[in-house]
Every structure is written in C-alpha cells, then in structure tokens.
Image (cartoon, helix red, strand yellow):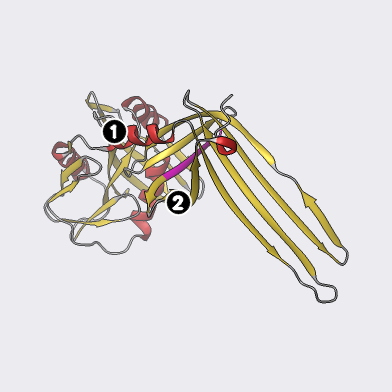
Amino acid sequence: MKRIILYLIVALFYFPAFGQLTGHVNYEKLGIAFDIPSGWYGEEGDGMLILRSTSIPGVIMIIPHNQTIEQLTQDARNGITEGDGTALKLSGALTTLSDRAVGGQFSGTMEWQPATAYIIGMSNPNEHAPGVYLAATTTKDQYNASYQRLCEQIYQSVRFSKTNLGTEVAEWKKWLSGVRLTYMNSYYSSDYTSGGISGGYSTEKTIDLCSKGHFNFNMNTDSSISGDGVSGYSYGNNDGQGTWEIGVSALGEVRLILHFHDGKEHNYTLDYSDDELKLNGTRYFRTTEGRYAPDCY
C-alpha cells in the first residue's frame, strides 16, 4: 500500500502528458492482460501503467505487486500515512470482490491536497506471478462514482495467465545451490611528491549459498592511507547469517533474497549474460570447489 500511494502522488501531480497505449494490453512475462477503457490512454512509467483521459480529470494506475490477498486486505484496512501531508484511509466498507480481490474507496490528502481514490487489489492465482493494484484517483472535489465504475470495468477485464517464471526460479535455485558468490574490487594510488598522500582499498564480498537453505555473508574492506600527518588502517566486518531463496519481483525480475536472522533483507536482481553472472548489475564469480567452495559447515 505504501508503494501505491507514492505512485499516486507522482502520477497525479508530476507525471507528464499521456502516451498512446489503448485497447487491449498484454504483459506476457508477468502473465497479466487487461483492457484500457475507451477514451483513456496509457503511459508506461516506472513499474506501472498510468491512464489519462482527454476529458476526465485524474488518473487510473495499474501497478504490479507481490502481495497475498490477506496482505492486501490488511493493508487496505490499515491505510497509509506518509510525511509531507500524505495520508489515505478507507472511507467506507472494504468490499470482497472475489476470493482474490478486494476494493474500497480511500479519502485523505496527497501532499496536503484533498484527494479521493477507489482502489482494487488483486492477487494472482499463479505461483511466482504478480498481482495488480488498480487505482482511480483525483482531487476530492472532482471525485464521483464514475471512478469506481472505471476501476471495476478494468477489474472485470483482467486476465491472469501462467508464465515461465516458475521454471526460471527453479533453474536459478538449482544453479545457485551449494555455491560461493564473490565480488572483488580494489584500488591503489600513490603520490611521491613532497607531502603527498598515498592509499588504497580492497573490497571482497562473499555470499555462500548452502544447499540446505542457509547462507553465510561476509564483506571485508581493507583500506590504508599514509602521508605526512595521516595514517590509518581498518579491518573487515561480518554482516551475519540467515536463509536464502529465489523469488520474483513485481516486475517479473528473478531475484536472490537473503533473509538475515536480525530481520534485515538483501535483494539482488539476477542476470546471466556474456558468460557473466551479475547481481544488481555487478559481476560476481560463482565457485564451488577448493579454497573457493562455500562455507556451509
């Protein structure tokens, strides 16, 4: 719910003019298809689709998510309160539209401006596939029942289909089970002039993904600085242990997720291209044997 409110603010107050997506829309990778209402036009934004009309004020947003129906229901009942004058709460009953969808009207302010929205949250019946939020919103004085009808019209057109994301998840899990992932980076510079300073650093991060589902995470950063009046040396640190899994983001990206025992969570988008494994766009080396085998004991 927090994510959708932030998107609503951007779409309602800051997003540029609409684009030209109309009619039937099918995001095959996500397994989500729907129809844009007549007279509305879509513009793809950062992880969402924003619909605008030439004659009706406000916006309709279609946003993928990874929540269950239970989480959608609880978030709707809790509402959301952000800083900078943003708070939306249910202003009526939360309606159960199906066993996988809930809808309700929300009222409050967005950046201190009175606003009203009708929001439907839908979960996806297919494993590893995202559901969607449908949100029709405008200023409080412009809102009327037609926004709910528009939202429900799109809801009736939504179709979820199976994707190959489950196969991708299984393949990644098999390939990363029982391996060590290593990131290395180093830099050194020297200045031999009078009064110059020389120094450098080296960073090594290892993620040991054990076949039983736990991991060891270590990051060591060694840095040294020397020169007239300046010297120092620092040692590495250990960030703890936990459990790991392969999941899918709301945008259909396969991710490595590290759940630390202290409650922290690290997410890495996975990619393998040009014979290189990349986590969040950064190259890691995958090893399994000898001194570079994972520490899983």
Number of numbered discs overlaid on the protein picture? 2
Residue 142 visible in the current orientation = no
If the image is split into quadrants, where does the N terminus sit?
top left
Dot 2: what SS?
loop
Most distant residue in the right direction:
229
The three-letter code of the residue at mark 2 reads Trp
Q: Earlier in the sequence, mark 2 or mark 1?
A: 2
Q: Marks 2 and 1: which is nearer the front?
A: 1
Residue 234 appears anywhere in the view: yes
Depth check: 270 or 89 in front?
270
Residue at the disc numbered 2: 112
Q: Position of residue 55 (x, y in %)?
A: 18, 59
Q: Residue at x 59, y 44 (%)?
A: 205
Looking at the rendered structure, which numbered label has been put on residue 126?
A: none
Q: Nearer the viewer, residue 54 or 62?
A: 62
Rendered image: mark on residue 166: 1
Q: Residue sitting at 38 percent across and 29 percent down?
A: 77
Q: Amino acid at mark 1?
A: Gly
Q: Residue furthest bottom?
A: 193
Helix, strand or loop for disc 1: helix
Where, quadrant-wise, is the C terminus in this rendering?
top right
Query: Magenta span covers which residues?
Result: 264-269
| Direction from residue 124 to residue 13 in the image, left or right | right
Query: Which residue corresponds to the image point at 14% horizontal and 55% vertical from the top-left?
Result: 22
Image location (x, y in percent) of residue 135: 28, 43
